[in-house]
């Protein structure tokens, strides 16, 4: 039996939900309930829920194909599932006959880890609902003691909260590649944009470090681009934008930062936004829409740009410039440039919208020359001290 992800419209409120169905269009109740809790209960974005949905559906398909009851799956069988993930090309369920698996692109460790996280979460949820036995979920994690707690972590009285549960099944995760862009590469991408909207979108990512979900969720009421916005009740001086989490965006864009934050912008950002407004005002369906980024060149005109349309845009840009460019690269580039300019890490943390300082470290990529200069500086200091 093969399980797939589908969209379903609720007859109660008309909302579009993600569900898991089999080949006969029969609903998988447990998986579908899990997806509903992710979105409505845990407030995950539809983009995250979509990724989890595909992973859970793939797990259910694998279990059925191998004659395994997912409700009573053992740790040994989960290890087999992990091995299957690692050895099967990510673009196909089974490789063609006569084709060596090693000649095909396999899933990276981070991808395998993401699949296991989604499946383990699904099984833990089912255990809380009484759909599977507790031992099924318990065997997938083990108790660990946090000897070194993160900053601001409260271990509780006598350290009782130092105990955490960690996933038993581990994967080898390769060091992520440096994913920053040079100024020349950024300019090349912007130059290849055919429309003012796209130029503003790309430049905005580089100039603010926003996540693509935050960028697509911006509204015109968030654009405080005058020297002062006190007449709007805003005490943050200078041109800036506000990043706010909203759950009613028609394009499904959901900001990860629950607190909301202002992000300063420069004059070039303001100028590109003004150019985009001229282009936007030429489309009647877009004039009264509050979302900043809307469809101007294909139906439905005026509706908010979606993740899919943005992904297609960056795929086209990648072909034009001759190198891979993705929205999240600009976030890495933004943070790395701030660090190179000597901006304190806590300021970078606030601009990126991170609650924990440890989250910011992922985005900081010191340049090779900066590291060499640092080492040479230490060497010169010691040499001078020795001579004295």
Image: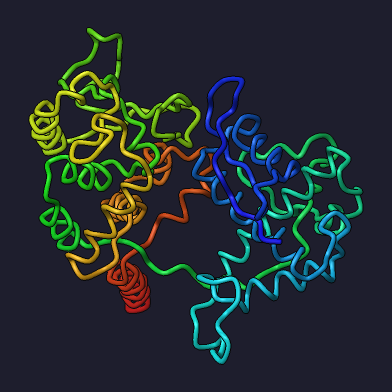
Q: Which residue is drawn at 63% across and 75% down?
A: 86
Q: In which quarter of the image is the N terminus?
A: bottom right
Image-quadrant location for residue 6? top right
Which quadrant of the rendered structure holds the C terminus? bottom left
Q: Relative to 236, is 89 on the left or the right?
A: right
Q: In this view, does 358 lie to the left or right of 246?
A: right
Q: Where is residue 215? Give x, y as percent.
A: 33, 38
Q: Which residue is drawn at 35% across and 75% down?
A: 379
Q: Nearest the camera: 221 or 236?
A: 221
Determine if residue 309 is in view.
yes
Q: In this view, does 18 lie to the left or right of 349?
A: right
Q: Determine whether 303 is above or below 367 in the image.
A: above
Residue 197 in the image: state x and y as whole percent.
17, 40
Q: Is residue 361 left or right of residue 211?
A: right
In front of the other: 172 or 77:
77
387 or 151, nearer to the observer: 151
Q: Nearer the viewer, residue 98 or 192?
A: 98
**For residue 188, above or below residue 353:** below
Q: Residue at x 29, y 27 (%)?
A: 291
Total numbered labels = 0
Q: Is residue 56 visible?
A: no
Residue 166 locus on image (x, y percent): 76, 56
The figure's colour scheme reads rainbow
Q: Position of residue 247 (x, y in %)?
A: 48, 26
Q: Residue at x 37, y 38 (%)?
A: 351
């Amino acid at each position: 039996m093969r399980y797939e992800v589908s969209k379903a419209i609720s007859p109660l409120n008309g909302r579009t939900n993600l569900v898991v169905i089999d080949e006969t269009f029969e609903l998988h109740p447990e998986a579908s309930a899990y997806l509903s809790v992710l979105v409505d209960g845990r407030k995950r974005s539809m983009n995250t829920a979509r990724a989890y949905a595909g992973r859970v559906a793939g797990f259910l398909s694998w279990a059925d194909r191998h004659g395994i009851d997912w409700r009573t799956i053992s740790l040994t069988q989960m290890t087999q599932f992990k091995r299957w993930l690692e050895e099967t090309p990510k673009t196909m369920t089974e490789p063609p006959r006569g084709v060596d698996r090693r000649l095909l692109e396999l899933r990276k460790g981070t991808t395998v880890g993401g699949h296991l996280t989604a499946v383990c979460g699904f099984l833990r949820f089912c255990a809380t609902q009484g759909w599977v036995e507790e031992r099924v979920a318990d065997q997938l994690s083990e108790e660990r003691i946090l000897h070194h707690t993160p900053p601001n972590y409260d271990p509780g009285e006598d350290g009782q909260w130092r105990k955490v549960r960690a996933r038993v099944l581990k994967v080898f995760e390769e060091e992520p590649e440096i994913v920053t862009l040079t100024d020349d590469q950024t300019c090349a991408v912007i130059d290849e944009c055919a429309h003012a909207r796209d130029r503003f979108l790309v430049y905005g990512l580089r100039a603010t470090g926003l996540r693509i979900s935050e960028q697509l969720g911006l509204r015109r009421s968030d654009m405080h681009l005058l020297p002062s916005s006190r007449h709007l009740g805003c005490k943050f001086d200078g041109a800036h934008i506000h990043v706010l989490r909203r759950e009613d965006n028609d394009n499904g864009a959901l900001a990860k930062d629950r607190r909301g934050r202002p992000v300063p912008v420069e004059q070039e950002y303001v100028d590109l936004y003004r150019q985009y407004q001229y282009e936007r005002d030429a489309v009647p369906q877009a004039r009264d829409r509050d979302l900043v980024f809307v469809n101007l060149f294909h139906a439905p005109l005026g509706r908010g740009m979606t993740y899919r349309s943005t992904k297609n845009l960056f795929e086209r840009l990648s072909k034009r410039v001759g190198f891979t460019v993705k929205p999240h690269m600009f976030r890495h580039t933004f943070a790395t440039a701030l660090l190179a300019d000597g901006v304190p890490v806590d300021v970078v943390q606030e601009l990126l919208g991170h609650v924990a300082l440890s989250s910011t470290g992922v985005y900081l990529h010191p340049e090779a020359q900066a590291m060499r200069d640092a080492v040479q500086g230490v060497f010169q200091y010691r040499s001078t001290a020795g001579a004295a």
